[in-house]
Image: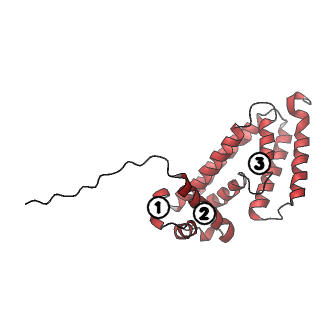
Amino acid sequence: MQKKQKTQKKIAMPDSQPPLTRDRILDAAQTILLRDGGDRLTIASVAKEARISKGGLFYHFASKQELVEGLIERYTREFDLLLESAGDSPGSAIDTYIRSAGRSDGPASRGVIAMLAAVIVDSEALGLLRQKYDHWNERLHADGIPPHIVSTVRYAVDGLWLADTLQLAAPSRSSRDRTIEFLQQMVEPFKAGQNT
């Protein structure tokens, strides 16, 4: 009598991973980067922080490089959606960029974490992030606001994100509000062609 060989049927998995587990892993990686530094970002430490097995982590990210790419992809996707929602009226994208710095834990702060991870782990990943920033910068400069105003706003907002993420003399709530108000006042005369 021949024994039947058991064949394992492969189950096709959808292209997108379950978002809750994937996001929990990315959140854990972000926590480790901020709390412990880049040298502590390991598959084992992320799995422990996310409270999943290393095998569970490998299901979503096959390597530390893929984990970093996941951080960058999540951040850039969120920020792409934010800028896309701005609309096409003059100054709308720059307004959205300014408002993104309204909270110290806003979506833009993840970008700083992604940048840090990219520098630490993989220079090619940093190249992807640079391409995205170039695209966003082009979008802001196509917003109908003079280039020197756009650059001033971008550098100020980027500085707020960096200060928040790394706790580098992070601004108080009132200081942040005044800074954002100042940036908005700087842009306002150029919206709707008031001051060309």
Quadrant location of residue 81? top right
Tag 1 residue = 58
Quadrant (top left/top right/bottom left/bottom right) for the C terminus: top right
Circle 1: element type? helix
Q: Tell me the CA gap for discs 3 and 2.
A: 22 Å
Give the class, few, some or many, for how many residues have Cα within 10 Å of label 3's Cα (few <14, many ≥20): many
Amino acid, disc 2: Ala
Mark 2 or mark 1: name the one nearer the start of the chain.
2
Q: Camera-side residue: 66 or 23?
A: 23
In the depicted structure, whether residue 183 falls above or below residue 3: above
Secondary structure state at the residue bearing disc 3: loop
**Location of mark 2 (residue):** 29
Name above or below for residue 184 compared with residue 40.
above
Instruction: State left or right for residue 41 relative to residue 171.
Output: left
Residue at image position (82%, 41%) is 150
Residue 100: mark in rendering: 3
Q: Nearer the viewer, residue 138 or 51?
A: 51
Task: Tell me which label, 3 or 1, sits earlier in the chain.
Answer: 1
If you read the primary sequence from the N terminus, does the residue marked by circle 3 or circle 2 appear first? 2
Q: Amino acid at mark 3?
A: Ser
Give yes or no for contact between labels 2 and 1 (Cβ–Cβ under 8 Å): no
| Three-letter code, disc 1 | Phe
Q: Quadrant of the N terminus?
A: bottom left
Q: Secondary structure at mark 2?
A: helix
- Image location (x, y in percent) of residue 182: 91, 47
Residue 189 in the image: above or below residue 155: above
Distance from the alpha carbon under mark 2 to that under mark 1: 14 Å
Residue at 60%, 56% (x, y): give it.
123
